[in-house]
Amino acid sequence: MNKTDLKITFAGGPVTIVGNKINVGDQAPDFTALSPELKPVKLSDYDGKVRILVVYPSIDTGVCAAQNRRFNVEANNLKDAVVLSISCDLPFAQARFCGAEGLNNIHTLSDHKDLDFGEKYGFVIEELRLLTRGTVIIDKDGIVKYVEYVPEITSDPDYEAALKVAKELV
């Protein structure tokens, strides 16, 4: 797997990010991940919509939980958009969290089985086999319009920058 040139830290220590780094202007690669029902879901299943990919290491951490809560709330204001919440958590953990929190506006996808998303978008933390934190926004034509790889995994993503781009596309 390719190592990226991203400088990412986890609690201050450097980690190695692998996969194919995605950039604004790229055609968004299709990928497959698992739904809470253990069914394969593809990015292309949402063609024709703006797709907001919310990427995080584990739903069972405070920052990851807050990230999902925030995008769940914002999804109400983003017509013609879908929020895809992606991690390497098991689909059961994602469903449990969303059910307990009442998060109905996001679609959780688990990349734990094949790391198909993580490898194609350059989000895999080599040392941990988890995804690093970030956001990717893809327009209705499948072009990447926004990418953030959060430099310190324990920090929040730049919600305002991502939401500004998302609102311009819907």
Image (spheres, rainbow, N blue to C red):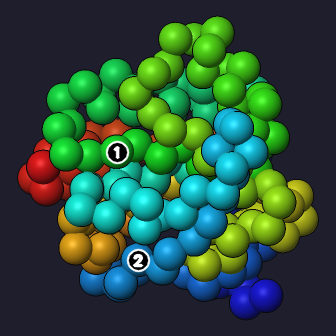
Can you tell which quarter of the image residue 46 is in? bottom left
- Percent of width and height locating residue 153: 65, 49
Can you tell which quarter of the image residue 9 is in? bottom right
Callout 2 secondary element:
loop
Number of other residues with Cα within 10 Å of mark 1, as a class: few under 14, some 14 to 19, many 20 or more = some
Number of other residues with Cα within 10 Å of mark 2, as a class: few under 14, some 14 to 19, many 20 or more = many
Q: Residue at x 29, y 29 (%)?
A: 74
Q: Which residue lies under the disc numbered 2? A: 28
The residue closer to the viewer here, 152 or 20, is 20
Q: Which residue lies under the disc numbered 1? A: 82
Question: Marks 1 and 2: CB-CB under 8 Å?
Answer: no
- Percent of width and height locating residue 50: 26, 56
The type of residue carrying mark 1 is: Val
The residue closer to the viewer here, 70 or 103, is 103
Mark 1 vs mark 2, CA separation in Å: 15 Å
Q: Residue at x 88, y 58 (%)?
A: 128
